[in-house]
Every structure is written in C-alpha cells, then in structure tokens.
Image (tube, rainbow, N blue to C red):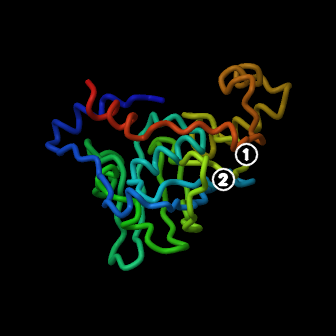
Amino acid sequence: MNKQSIYHKNYIENGYLMNYEKPPKVLRTSNQVYQFKIELLDIFPTIWRRILVPADYNFWDLHMAIQDAMGWTGSHLHHFEIKGKGKRRMSSVGVPNFYNMHELPEIFPGWEISMHKYFNDLGEEAKYMYDYGDGWVHSVKLEGFIFREKKVKYPHCIGGERACPPEDCGGVPGYQEVIETLSNPYHSRHRDMRIWVGENWDAEKFNPSKVFFHDPYKIWKQAFLET
C-alpha cells in the first residue's frame, strides 16, 4: 500500500488541521454494519464488490475498504460525490484538492466526516472517483443495515465478480487494450503485457475470501502524520 507521504507536506502547507473523526459514543458501541455494493462504471461485464463495513466508519475508512475490496493500491487521489437524504446540494468528500488539479470542486477531508452523515438511508448512492488521470468512476450504493455476527471481522467482503483493472493501465480505453492484447497470444505485445500485469492476473477471476483489509487509521497516519 502506497504511503502517500507527500500528503503530509501538502496538507500542513495549506493550513489544514489534522482531525481524524471519532464517531459519537452511541455509534462506537453500535452492533451494526453497513452493506454496500460497489460497481466500476463503463466496463462490461461489470466489475463489482459487496462489502460490510462498521457503522462508525468515516469516509476515509470507507475509501480504504473500497480500495482493498476492489484491488486498487491507494496510490492516487480520490473523492466521493454524494448528496445524502435531507441535504440540499451535492458534496465532495475525500482528499482535498491541494493544487487545484483538474478543475475539481472543493473537497472536504474524508477523515473528518462520519459516513452515516451522508449514507443515512437505504438506497443512498455516491460516485467514488479514483485516479483522476485514468478516471475510474465507481457507484457506491447502501444496500442495508445489518447486525454484526460473532467471530466475523469487519470490514468483510461477501461477494464480487471479475478482477480489478491493473493500476495505471490508462482508464477504460487502456483496460480494453489490455484485455484485447492478452486475449491474442499472437499479438506483438502479448508477452510484454503479460509480464506487466503479472502472470497470475486473470480478468475473470475474483475470490472474496482473498481480500485483505488494511487498518485505515494506520494508513492515514502514514499518509498524513509521518514524514
């Protein structure tokens, strides 16, 4: 997992305060988890995941769970676009836009905003943007509120199909090129492409039981507090 240590310098230089949102006591002791379905848009057949995450997560925590479940590396910027029930306008939540890149809207720090403030009703849906260069867009839909099960460690991936695209492959067009190249053993770039994506990468395979979830707070500290 990329530590993204450059965030620390940028964040301090731009005058932000570091505040990792601690949920209200009632939520810290909650026995609920949220069930989300994540779909990577503009690719067919669909690449999707279904995950269960603790109800007291903030948006950074949710971001990390999505990254791990999908198979991304966390090496690029991200943000959510969500309105939420009872909200008047769309909000962008994620890593602040330090350098005003790509004409992005104002982005509020995801680690300072509890997930439940926007995902506050069944069917609530957000767009999750990752890697502004490749332009990956995911839908993130709240499907249910579920009670925790004993002996189950959360977050937990309970379903999904197809492998995550290789990081930095060039977005949807680049991904399609990867698939076309690998499907033709006579393609001039077939061998090089196979080496680049990895010998074991298979676009059609995904095993939920193999998903490893990193500690989101630990990754946040590495990214923003450690120089």
Cα–Cα span, label 1 and label 2: 7 Å
Q: Position of residue 141 (x, y in %)?
A: 55, 64
Q: Count all numbered tags in the image, as a single digit.
A: 2
* Residue 184 shows up from this direction: yes
Asked if residue 46 lies left or right of residue 144, the reply is right
Mark 2 packing: few (<14 Cα in 10 Å), some, or many (20+)?
A: many
Q: Position of residue 39 (x, y in %)?
A: 62, 56
Give the image quarter of residue 46: bottom right
Specify whether 71 is left or right of 46. Answer: left
Which residue was labeled with disc 2? 48
* Element assignment for label 1: loop
Residue kind at label 2, given as amino acid type: Trp
- Left or right relative to 20: residue 17: left
Secondary structure at badge 2 equals: strand
Disc 1 crowd rating (10 Å Cα; few below 14, some 14-19, many 20+) is some
The residue located at (44%, 45%) in the rendering is 132
Task: Give me the residue at 55% from left, 73% from top.
Answer: 123
Give the amino acid at mark 1.
Arg
Q: Which residue is at 77% across, 24% downward?
A: 190
Q: To which residue does mark 1 refer?
A: 162
